[in-house]
């Protein structure tokens, strides 16, 4: 697409008519124009690259500028290690419009690559049925985020916590993109968030067969 030969041929076609301006591609003049054409092709390629840099989903060279404008990294994204994770955090930040519905929070998690469902609670009232939860008034402000993990993601997440960790460390972390932080930041201030992680790992995950008796 950015062929210096094509630029050289264009420049040759723009030369005035006459014996003084040789149009043979092997002439000295054509070789001079070829040197100029190489730079034109390089600049054209760089300009074409701006199309990729103008899109936060594909930017590379301007990723740092995008992050500066978006205020990243922040308290919920940390400092991502990979380009793809940095792009994901960037797209999530600049496309965020806010919302308070269940669908909004489910969509927020989906953009980060997670599947969640949300359960709400109610105070136990007169006329309750057998088996209903005995919830007090405070439960009206609580909601549970169920995070559905596959086996691969769970092994990555649980590896974040180990013996000797500080009090308050997350039992499950997701790299630099902290799902709990992102949802908590967008959640209503009066709500009480509960996170629940679900998975069905292979049985061997829970046992260390590397140790012998």
Image (spheres, rainbow, N blue to C red):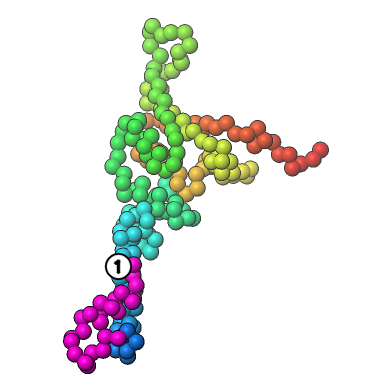
Q: In which quarter of the image is the N terminus?
A: bottom left
User: Horizontal and vertical percent for residue 136?
Assistant: 42, 18
Q: Which of 58 and 95 is in front in this view?
A: 58
Instruction: Let me know if residue 187 appears in the view.
Output: no
Q: Residue 41 vs residue 193: left or right?
A: left
Q: Nearer the viewer, residue 51 or 186?
A: 51
Q: Does the magenta stretch include residue 4?
A: yes
Name the residue rendered at 46%, 16% in the picture.
Answer: 133
* Mark 1 lies on residue: 47
User: Horizontal and vertical percent for residue 14?
Assistant: 20, 81
Q: To which quarter of the image does residue 58 belong?
A: bottom left
Q: To which quarter of the image does residue 15 belong?
A: bottom left
Q: To which quarter of the image does residue 54 belong?
A: bottom left
User: Horizontal and vertical percent for residue 175?
Assistant: 50, 47
User: Horizontal and vertical percent for residue 130?
Assistant: 47, 8
Mark 1 secondary-structure assignment = helix
Name the residue rendered at 30%, 40% in the picture.
Answer: 98
- Magenta stretch, residue numbers: 1-24
């Amino acid at each position: 697409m950015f062929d210096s030969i094509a630029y050289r041929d264009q420049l040759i076609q723009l030369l005035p008519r006459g014996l003084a301006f040789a149009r043979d591609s092997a002439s000295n003049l054509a070789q001079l124009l070829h040197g100029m054409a190489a730079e034109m092709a390089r600049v054209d390629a760089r300009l074409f690259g701006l199309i990729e840099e103008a899109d936060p989903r594909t930017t590379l060279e301007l990723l740092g500028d995008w992050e500066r404008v978006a205020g990243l990294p922040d308290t919920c994204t940390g400092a991502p290690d990979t380009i793809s994770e940095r792009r994901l955090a960037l797209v999530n930040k600049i496309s965020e419009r806010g919302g308070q519905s269940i669908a909004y929070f489910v969509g927020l998690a989906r953009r980060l690559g997670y599947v969640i469902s949300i359960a709400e609670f109610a105070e136990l009232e007169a006329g309750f049925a057998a088996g209903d939860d005995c919830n007090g008034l405070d439960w009206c402000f609580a909601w549970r985020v169920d995070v559905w993990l596959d086996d691969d993601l769970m092994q990555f997440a649980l590896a974040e916590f180990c013996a000797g960790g500080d009090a308050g460390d997350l039992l499950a972390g997701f790299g630099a993109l902290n799902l709990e932080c992102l949802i908590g930041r967008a959640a209503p201030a009066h709500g009480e968030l509960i996170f629940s992680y679900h998975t069905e790992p292979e049985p061997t995950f829970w046992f260390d067969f590397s140790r012998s008796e």
